[in-house]
Image (spheres, rainbow, N blue to C red):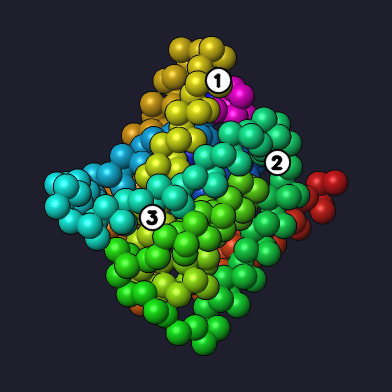
């Protein structure tokens, strides 16, 4: 992998991680197009740290207020519990299925493209449903709803599904409005992506070379910069415009990918 390829992939990670389009799919398909493959498929996971830090940076004030309120505010404690409960399914299933996901699902462009197309159809369908939201503040989501969102998030272990997409759709179906669903997805990303980063680093650190570390560092910085921009504007965009734009984008990328696979094979 060259420096410019790591930079490009980092930008793609930062631009797509918090949008319902599947950053992993975009990374893997771009790598397929460029003809590059990272050691142990670690680059794609480890550069997520840049996107995580982007989210923590933008939400630093909100997080500090939440932490300082924990001792005295029952509502804040319940919200933190909701995020942790939502994280649990991915933690358990992700650890159990890690090898299968990395060795098989990450290696199938066909599965990725099909998931992109099916996910696009789902987003277009959900955006047109006459849903009647009951929750308009991320702090008010019930614990049982949070658990349901956590199980929905697990669908994103299939590359192309999208972690943010599955959690946003799950939250909307469970009564959240679009903005609340997207914001809960942001908070849920913090433990989920941190856990995925830590587990992948633990499993593969011995495989990494100095060159790998250098490329990951470039991708990390690019993902951080792009992620800050996206996190600042994504909530308002989803609240105002909904999910249809992302649904059509997924259909375009997945359709082009399927067409390319048909021609090449």
| Labels 2 and 3 touching (C-beta < 8 A) | no
For mark 2, what is the residue? 105
The stretch of residues the image draws in magenta is 34-42
Q: Earlier along the polypeptide chain: callout 2 or callout 1?
A: 2
Q: Residue furthest bottom?
A: 130
Q: What element carries label 2?
A: helix
CA distance separating discs 2 and 3:
29 Å
Distance between mark 1 and mark 3 Cα atoms: 31 Å
Query: Counting residues from the N terminus, which is met first, the one under dot 2 or under dot 3?
Result: 3
Residue 263 lies, with reference to residue 195, above or below; the image says below
Quadrant of residue 56 in the image? top left
Q: Which mark is residue 115?
A: none
Is residue 78 in sight in this rendering? yes
Q: Residue at image x 23%, y 44%?
A: 57
Residue 175 image position (x, y, % from top left): 45, 75
Q: How would you rate the neighbour count of disc 1 (Cα within 10 Å): few for under 14, some for 14-19, many for 20 or more?
A: few
Residue 204 is tagged as 1
207 vs 114, left or right, is left
Dot 1 or dot 3: first in sequence order is 3
Residue under circle 3?
82
Tell whether 116 sits left or right of 74.
right
In the picture, measured across the screen, residue 210 lies left or right of residue 187, that is right
Label 2 to label 1: alpha-carbon separation: 18 Å
Q: At which x and y percent is residue 190?
A: 37, 44
Side of 183 relative to 175 (left or right)? left
Tell me which residue sits at (85%, 46%) in the image. 265
Q: In the rendered view, tell whether residue 226 sits above or below residue 115.
A: above
Residue at 35 percent across and 51 percent down: it is 81
The picture places residue 37, in percent across and down from the top left corner, at 62, 29
């Amino acid at each position: 992998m060259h420096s410019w390829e790591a930079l490009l992939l980092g930008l793609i990670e930062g631009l797509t991680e918090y949008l319902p389009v599947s950053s992993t799919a975009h990374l893997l398909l771009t790598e397929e197009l460029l003809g590059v493959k990272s050691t142990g498929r670690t680059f794609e996971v480890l550069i997520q740290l840049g996107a995580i830090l982007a989210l923590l940076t933008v939400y630093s004030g909100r997080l500090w207020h939440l932490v300082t309120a924990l001792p005295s505010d029952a509502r804040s404690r319940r919200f933190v519990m909701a995020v942790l409960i939502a994280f649990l399914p991915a933690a358990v299933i992700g650890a159990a299925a890690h090898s299968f996901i990395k060795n098989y699902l990450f290696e199938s462009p066909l599965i990725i493209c099909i998931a992109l197309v099916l996910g696009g159809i789902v987003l277009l369908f959900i955006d047109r449903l006459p849903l009647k939201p009951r929750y308009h503040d991320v702090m008010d989501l019930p614990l049982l709803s949070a658990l349901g969102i956590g199980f929905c998030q697990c669908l994103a272990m299939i590359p192309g599904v999208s972690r943010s997409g599955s959690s946003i759709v799950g939250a909307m179906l469970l009564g959240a409005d679009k903005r609340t669903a997207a914001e809960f997805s942001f908070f849920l990303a913090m433990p989920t992506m941190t856990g995925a980063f830590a587990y992948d680093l633990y499993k593969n650190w011995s495989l990494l070379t100095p060159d790998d570390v250098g490329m990951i560092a470039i991708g990390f910085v690019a993902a951080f910069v792009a992620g800050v921009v996206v996190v600042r504007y994504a909530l308002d965009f989803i609240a105002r415009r909904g999910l249809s734009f992302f649904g059509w984008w997924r259909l375009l990328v997945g359709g082009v990918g399927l067409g390319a696979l048909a021609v090449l094979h």
